[in-house]
Amino acid sequence: MYGLIIENVLGYLRANFHPKMVEDIILSAKLPFERAEIDKVYPEGYIPKIGKKASLLLSTPEQDIFEGVGVYFVNVAEQLGYRQTVLSIAREFREFIMNLDNCHDYFKLTFTKMRAPSFFVDREHEKGLTLYYRSKRRGFSYYVLGQMKQLAKVYFNIDLKIKIQRQEVIFDTISVSYLLEFDNSAFVVNQQNMTLRQEASLPIRAHVIFEIFPFSILLSESLVITLVGTSLRQIIPDCIGMPLSNCFTLVRPLVEFNADQFMQKTNNVFVFQSLIPAQRTARSRQIKLTTEDDALKNFDDDVDLDRLQIRGCLMFMSMWKKILFIGCPIIDNLPNLVRNGLFINDLSMHDYSRDIMITSSQYLMEERMTRQLLLTNDQILEKMEDKITDLEKEEEERLCQLIPPKLLHKLIQEKFPMVSKLDSVPILIARIEDVEGMTRDAKSDDFVDLVDNIKKVFEHLIENTKTFYIQTIENFMAIADFTGDYPPNAQADSIGMLALELQNAANEAFKDPIGIGTKLSLSVAISTGPVVAAVMGDKVPKFGLFGSTVHRAEELVEGCPPNKIVVDAPTKKALPGTFKVFESAIESDNPIFILDEKLDYVPTPIIPILQAYTAFKASKNRYNDQAKAKMEQDLEETELRLREQSKLMSSCGGFHTKSNVCNLI
């Protein structure tokens, strides 16, 4: 059931009762929404629930509520713009009632999953008629009654008297008969016109009818197929002589399958669906259906596109004493035509299905081309998004090289200021001895590899000791974590551990590129005191330290003996007792101490770190080469596809004319 009906019921309640009562009805009926979406399909049980709860809470008979909802629906339909459609259906009210069963077909394109009821007329006379309503839904009999009253009043200016004569349930279908009383003088005029037409009618041969209407069926009074149209004979050749019920099932209207019922409903549109699969010729089987064509089968759940459906009207041919069904197939696109074993030539010249299929095929081809172009563009966009993601990742990695990662994340989350003054924090500076000699005498590649390896090991040790790395040109600098996660004694402990780890790495893994087999000389100094930490720069932000403590650490490393760790007095005081520190013989205005070792200190193995880093660099170089080649190949393929799509779209520029579409097909 579409939300249009549910919203119509709720709208009627809102317009006639207090909003608080409507809220209570919605809560009591356990509806998961306050307003229904008009074009959305909802469960069938919502309307009976709303009706029962509204009747209980409002102390109003359920019949009166639904009659009022029916009246209100006419106003809603007018607001939605259906006034012109209703007015254009018929000249007289009786003609409107005669075509009531067909009205739902006019809205089938908008509401594709509509389960329409059936309406047909019986016992018409000059003072009214009897209307039959059949549906698989319960509880809508008074809803229809209210609609009829309001339609007659608003659109035909008729004071209609209507009442329910009989209501019964036949299997799963509810059948209701209404007695409509109104001035039906148009019926008398229609009867007179029919008499005049019969007197002035001309004889016509049967074969002419079956050529003009190639999907017509001639039936005996017992509903046995006598003749069929030329096109129907091509796809269901064995149906002649068989009962109609063995070849076709009745989709609409909802009446019993017998000749008497058929002849009483000649004002209704009949829809028959074949029970026998269509016979496809060898040429028809050569036409392959794509997966997109098969997907069209699910467009309407009520229609089985593997079985031919014929829509038309029935009339009794008195000169033949036969029942004639004149109709046309319900086919809206070429795949469905092919699926039923038909060709465009099988359709009659006056059948508008030809134009519908050609137009739908035109739209389908344009849609496929547009979808292919969008798919190509989506692939390009996806690659661009991947590239942007890679660039963002590279940018973050680059920032992490300039700003310690932990500090960077806190700055992004605004949990730490861009500039902060620190009262007391330990700073470490490490320097490679005889750098000038190395750059002069060693091979450039060897020196660059050495510095790169030291930097990588330094970064690894920085991470292990929970300290911050600071980018400098000449030396390696580190500072203890000052973001508030560690107390002062822990800061000194982490910087002291880093100094010992650096000395161990220099002795274990690094060799002087000048002297064969000699170990690398590394001097380390630690100074503790107040500093200013700041992140500077907009385009290339960089983390730096300023203050006398930084200068003090630089002076200490300048005078530090090779392969030693020197600390100042504040650092010695801050270091835990597990570190072994003694006074040095270095001349200075302030006392200088040598950090020798730490109790229970276990050095970190450095060789595995260097081996893993060397393997990573080799694989990264190979990956970069492969990625570059793949990117160039993808760009070439994308440019080629875009050129082909552009040529195809330009060649299809004239599709919007019928002749070009026919030529293409």
Image (cartoon, helix red, strand yellow):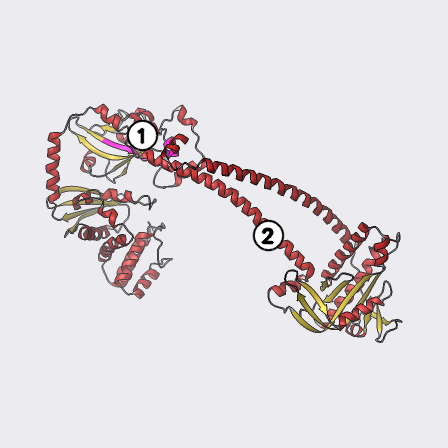
Whether 332 is among the magenta residues is: yes
Q: Secondary structure at mark 1?
A: loop
Query: What amino acid is labelled 2 in the image?
Result: Thr
Relative to residue 200, is residue 183 depicted above or below?
below
Any part of residue 184 in sight? yes
Q: In the rendered view, does 327 fall on the left or right side of 655? A: left
Between 373 and 613, which is closer to the camera in this rendering?
373
Give the magenta range.
325-337
Lower sequence index among marks 1 and 2: 1
Distance, label 1 to label 2, CA atoms, is 56 Å
- Name the spot of residue 593 as percent of width and height, x first: 84, 71
Q: Which residue is mark 2?
A: 389
In this view, the residue farthest toward the bottom is 589
- Name the spot of residue 134 as percent of width and height, x first: 24, 44
Query: What amino acid is labelled 1 in the image?
Result: Leu
Q: Secondary structure at mark 2?
A: helix
* Residue 473 image label: none
Between 531 and 49, which is closer to the camera in this rendering?
531
* Quadrant of the frame with the C terminus: top left
Q: Which residue is mark 1?
A: 347
Relative to residue 521, is residue 381 depicted above or below?
above
**Label 1 crowd (10 A; few <14 / some 14-19 / many >=20):** many
Whether 272 is among the magenta residues is: no
